Image: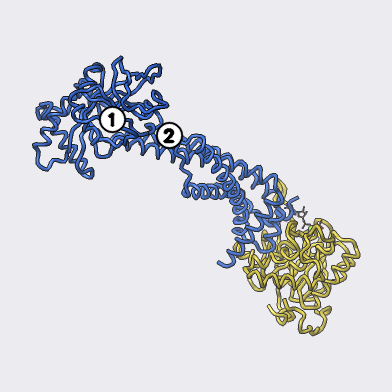
Chain colours: A blue, B yellow
Amino acid sequence: MKRFLYELSESWKIAVAQMRSNKTRSTLTALGVVIGIVAVTLMGTAIGGIQVGFDKSMAIFGDDVLYVSQWPWKRVDDWWNYRDRKKIKTEYAEPINRIIAATPNSNLVIAVPTSSLLRSVKNGQSEVSNVLIRGTVSDYLITSTFDFKEGRFFNDVESRGGANVCVIGYDVADALFPSESPIEKSVLINGQPFRVVGVISRQGTFLGLFSLDSIVVMPLPAFQKYFSAKSDSDVLVKVKDKTRLAEARDELTGVMRRVRGLPPEKKDDFSINEQQALKSTLDPIKNSIAIAGLFITGLSLFVGAIGIMNITFVSVKERTREIGTRKALGARRRTILLQFLIESASLCLLGGFIGLGVAYVMCTGIGQAFPSFPIQFSLGLVLVSMAVSILTGLFSGFAPAWSASRLDPVAALRYE
Amino acid sequence: MTSDTRLSDSIIIDIENITKDYVMGEEIVHALRGVSLQIHSNEYLAIMGPSGSGKSTLMNMLGCLDTPSSGRYEFNGRDVSSMTDDELASIRNREIGFVFQTFNLLPRADSLRNVELPLIYAGMDPETRRERAAHVLREVGLDDRLHHKPNELSGGQRQRVAIARALVNDPSIILADEPTGNLDSKTGDEIMTLFENLYQRGHTIILVTHEADIANHARRTVRLRDGLIESDDGGFGGIDNLPVEDPLPANATVY
Ligand SMILES: Nc1ncnc2c1ncn2[C@@H]1O[C@H](COP(=O)(O)OP(=O)(O)OP(=O)(O)O)[C@@H](O)[C@H]1O
Ligand SMILES: [Mg+2]
């Protein structure tokens, strides 16, 4: 054991001396690893960022809200069984709420109808297009997670009366009222003026694809008056206890079957969706992006590893006589093996350190240039990168080190 | 191993009918064709012979660097042919000191580290091995060259470092293949004086040489020709030439 430690420290000294005396060569070889580690680390950071963004986006849906929709949020293989489904109507909310109220110990709290479509929103010369216009009731707040930057949500009276009031998202407010408060001002949608009563605080983007702040929420009756055609409707149902989501789901399914008057032999003609379903649909996509990304960047690390392997082979060749001498002096096979493994591993580790430093600087730069992109440069990532570079070194050093350890001492000593 | 056993008439090397063949494509080179030899402790033996006669092959065999194609080899009573690679490495490390014609020092290591190397492989702790390496370097007259790299030393000094390295593990036997081959005659003589001193102190030395006046330092000469022993003037142990009961100074072989 002690002897092993001495051999280890000896190998380490040789490795350092070797790198010092071949500075250019070591630097160039390590560069391959540097590039590989930078690529892998940046990809890891990006994947971490995507993960955080993904979780944030998912949180929008709330983990205690069920969505009654026409289609399921997950991919189905028998789509033809779904194509004749009737649309979900906002009117369902009322009977659902009646049944909930009549059910003792119901796991459901309240049903909220929503109806949405895309329209442009104007204020004077300014215009924002493709804004999500959503009609709902004042109880929508219960099922949502957002705060207000200023103002308030529309109240129950405005909601029932279908007043021409609205709450606008951060982006809409920013684009239409860059230098003033939008509260009590009017925006034009489809030529109709709506009085702004509140501005929702910034929500960010959904999976980085579209802004969650490009939204206008208004009372459902007003929405139906002006935009009834071609809108998609859902009913949101808040759950009392989110740890008993499955039961809540079953209960809601029963309620919906009653509302739709389905006979027992018929299948459900609606879908109950939840955040989890969406997650499980999107997770594989996210994971394959991550795997593909890591694979591609892993290739660059592999190229670096081949560089290390190559240089270690060269080093073994150059030092064949030295290996012979060491064997004559009593070095065992595993001593020689260890020596060259440590050489390649320390070269890789050097590359790994530099690569990590470069990646850190780049991450910080990206973080400053694009503050919205969530950068995840964690200690875990550092440790993984170090481990990966050491493993790369051991992997790429193994073949040359093995061949060195197997050299015949006499042949090695005679080598010219 | 103490100086006492070294001085006693024990057999260190006992080979019988050793052959070594090299296969070169179609052709088989018979480098050794059946060599038998016994070498006792505290012998000073020169192996001579024309180029290609198998001197180096025999030396490599004696040094456990190579294994014979056939024949028997016992080192200190142990059968070498049945040893594993690691056991051979251990024998080379503890029992044999090599001195090469080309010195074979590690170019980037200073004298001290070069001499320390066998002790590292023996698993000795850093402090002891440093001390011991320095001591042996002093023995060969390099007190002031401990931290010189090989390229900062003369040829003779390099060979002294190499000899110190061969001595540092207190081996049973020192094998030197043309140790003066790369040195001028004056430096060569100095090296031979060093060997003579080592011999006087009880070391066992085998050296290969072309030159008669180098071989004259030895007490026994074995001549090879075409892979066979042509002559062996010393007989077993070269007893006639042994310095009779040469009393060792108390501090002679401290290492
Ligand atoms: N690895 C090898 N492959 C093939 N033949 C070899 C090998 N090593 C040695 N020989 C042959 O074995 C014979 C003995 O070689 P060896 O090196 O022992 O000679 P030597 O007596 O040391 O000669 P020199 O005085 O020139 O050093 C030579 O004919 C040589 O060609
Ligand atoms: Mg030779």
Residue A289, labelled with which disc? 2
Q: Residues within 10 Å of mark 2 (few under 14, many from 20)?
A: some
Tell me: B147 left or right of A314: right
Residue type of the residue flagged with mark 2: Ile
Where does the image place residue A258, in percent across and percent down from the top left? Answer: 10, 30
User: On the rendering, which quadrant does ligand 1 occupy?
Assistant: bottom right
- What kind of element bears circle 1? loop
Residue plotted at (76% across, 66% down): B175
Give the image quarter of residue A339: bottom right
Residue type of the residue flagged with mark 1: Trp
Residue plotted at (37% across, 27% down): A173
Where does the image place residue B253, in percent across and percent down from the top left? Answer: 75, 78
From the viewer's side, name the closer residue of A394 and B244: A394
Residue B114, labelled with which disc? none
Give the image quarter of residue A329: bottom right
Tell me: B176 left or right of A193: right
Q: Is mark 2 within 8 Å of ligand 1?
A: no
Closer to the observer: label 1 or label 2?
1
Give the image quarter of residue A108: top left
Q: Residues within 10 Å of mark 1 (few under 14, many from 20)?
A: many
Instruction: Note whether residue A355 is visible.
Output: yes
Q: How far apart are the alpha carbons under marks 1 and 2?
A: 20 Å
* Above/below status of A141 relative to A312: above
Tag 1 residue:
A73
- What kind of element bears circle 2? helix
Report if the CB atoms under discs 1 and 2 are less than 8 Å apart. no
Nearer-N-terminus badge (1/2): 1
Instruction: Note whether residue A399 is visible.
Output: no
Residue plotted at (30% across, 34% down): A278
Q: Is mark 1 within 8 Å of ligand 1?
A: no
Where does the image place residue A286, in percent across and percent down from the top left? Answer: 39, 35
Tell me: A392 left or right of A88: right
